[in-house]
Amino acid sequence: MKFSIVVYAAPHSAEAAATAFNFTRSVLEQGHDIYRLFFFGDGVHNASRLSVVAQDENNLQQQWDQLIRDHGLDSVICVSSAVNRGIVDAQEASRHELGAVSAYASSELAGLGQLIDATMHSDRVINFG
Amino acid sequence: MKFSIVVYAAPHSAEAAATAFNFTRSVLEQGHDIYRLFFFGDGVHNASRLSVVAQDENNLQQQWDQLIRDHGLDSVICVSSAVNRGIVDAQEASRHELGAVSAYASSELAGLGQLIDATMHSDRVINFG
Amino acid sequence: MASKNTNKAITFISRRAPYGDSNAQLCLEMALACAVFGQTVSYVFLDDGVYQLLKHQDARGIDSKTLGKALETLDLYGIENVCVDADSLSERGIRGGDLVLEVEPVSRTHIAELIDQADTVFNL
Amino acid sequence: MASKNTNKAITFISRRAPYGDSNAQLCLEMALACAVFGQTVSYVFLDDGVYQLLKHQDARGIDSKTLGKALETLDLYGIENVCVDADSLSERGIRGGDLVLEVEPVSRTHIAELIDQADTVFNL
Amino acid sequence: MTCLHTISKSPTSKLLSSCVSVLKPGDGILFIEDGVYYCSPAESGRHPGADIRLFALQEDVAARGLSVPSAADVELVDYAGFVGLCCEYEKIVSWF
Amino acid sequence: MTCLHTISKSPTSKLLSSCVSVLKPGDGILFIEDGVYYCSPAESGRHPGADIRLFALQEDVAARGLSVPSAADVELVDYAGFVGLCCEYEKIVSWF
């Protein structure tokens, strides 16, 4: 079965970010497909590559990055939510002359059209907020 | 009168960040002093220098930076909340080899001791979350 | 389930007051995008979401865009199936004449139908 | 108002359930820091905050630290004035024997006193 | 189409009451995150009728030190079970 | 010491009820952000007694299209008034 997963919550402030991650990993373990991950609102912080945690803690952002790369997942960060919140890729950093990239390259900044496309092509859409 | 202001909320996700800013500006306009601004939890996102907004919108992070510099305010971002959430200064960026600075230089990353010190030396402490 | 690549029925339930957090704004943006991409959209105001419909909102003083004004774009984007939970209105002492949109007060049974008929529901 | 540079009385009201969001964790961190810096701390569990006190918590399955365990540090840091709102417990069907700490159930009048006597109150 | 509703805030949120008012027979409810406090005995009076199956995410129940009596009308599921429910029901509505 | 309580969530939060239960005579309550919905007529029955002064932040009231009748027991203040209240009362407790 083909899932798309929409995440509205940031790591460290809401458990929902971790729930979304554990759910996504379980979907893959059960042999289902992920059509797309879509990070919206505060959810864009899941793609921050600048997060640092203590040695005995999980780095959820790093775990997402690893999972996305290991499984070649299609992962989209909503571009307007992202730039508002300081999550920028190389292209946005250059366009706005920020001199710093804060988003993992494993996710792509794109518009809400990618979410609508996901609802059209997935068997199940599930939201975590 | 000497105020310290504690902010737990991030711009774009909670109005409380803007309320804290408007309150702080008004404290200064009334001729009172700000002993310290302290950004905690999601509040650390107020110090993100990577936020970009549309032309017709306020950039709250930029407004904080301007206010802090114009009035020489003592502004502290809780270091553990900040690095967890990807808000890093030059020193943390270098220590963790992140290659990017996401915090405005007008705020300082420091520990909760700075909050306790603020409660000891202020006439009023007010929280926005 | 509708077959792939076809038009989908998407129901939005907007359940938060405007301004205090960003959920009401995000919900509206998603619905407008759905309409642009030709999906069949229903939009429901429930619980504190009915506060979004109050007339005379003016958010300039809190450095924000006025959401009540932005809701008018629902109609501009061709989203006609807009309704509001009658119980949520009456619990908050809001009358139909106080609303910024011409929007039909409906029962919970009607909202249950809109969820039932939808392929996907966004509820925030 | 107490004069500058002296010891201050600080009351914490921890009002959120653990894990769902970070408020319970932040509140605890602030109180421990206050104790380290020699302030007089009172710690009150109110509303959903009383859920933090349930025994047998084990948060490994949700990749989190177990807050019920972390609360034991209140005592280690010398914070002795810890109490819990009796009404919040009974509304949630929680008995005194179900709690992870030996903590006194108190009335709202007592909590009002703790707020009244404090120089600063943190409520989250 | 049958629907799985997830509820992820504590009973203080009143989310269950909103959710129950728009259910259809055959729908299911899964309590996750702080929603699992709806499984405590003090809340069982608010549970909907027997035509609505109730579930709770084991990992969140354990984190919070709750015990769901085997006699209760709530079935515990792990993450694999959560995914299974999402396949069994035809769509998912999240209440947060 | 007299205390100003700020409340910043809508009545769905039940924050006013928690706040009122720990008030002292002479305290004040200031509604800000979504807390200003407590000023709507449907909520006035929950307001505390006359020994507690009630205020609401004008900017938040205007943003939400609320009108607070002049006969109501709620005084409107702007940000300057908010700062003034923080000086007048001896400490501030924020409910959010």
Image (cartoon, coloured by chain):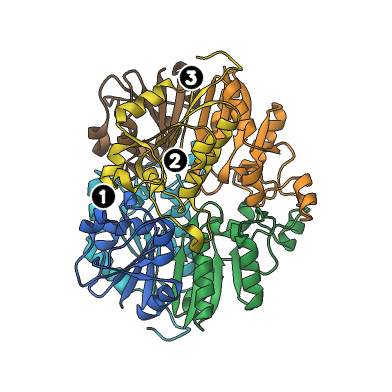
Chain colours: A orange, B green, C yellow, D cyan, E brown, F blue
For mark 3, name the chain. E
Residue at image position (48%, 43%) is: C71
Q: CA distance from mark 2 to mark 1?
A: 21 Å
| Closest to the observer, A70 or C95 | C95
Q: CA distance from mark 1 to mark 3?
A: 35 Å
Where residue A60 appears, as percent x and y from the top left, is: 61, 41
Where residue D54 appears, as percent x and y from the top left, is: 34, 45
Residue at image position (46%, 31%) is: C80
Tell me the mark number nearer the camera, choosing from 2 and 1: 1
| Closest to the observer, D72 or E6 | E6
- Mark 2: give few (<14), some (14-19) or many (20+) Cα within 10 Å: many
Tell me the mark number nearer the camera, choosing from 3 and 2: 3
Which secondary structure, mark 2? Answer: loop
Which label sits on residue E84?
3
Q: Identify the amino acid type marked 2.
A: Asp
For mark 2, name the chain. D
Q: Identify the amino acid type marked 3.
A: Gly
Which label sits on residue D58?
2
Question: Is residue E58 visible in the rendered structure shown here?
Answer: yes
Where residue A68 appears, as percent x and y from the top left, is: 68, 32
Which label sits on residue C21?
none
Q: Which residue is mark 1?
A: D89
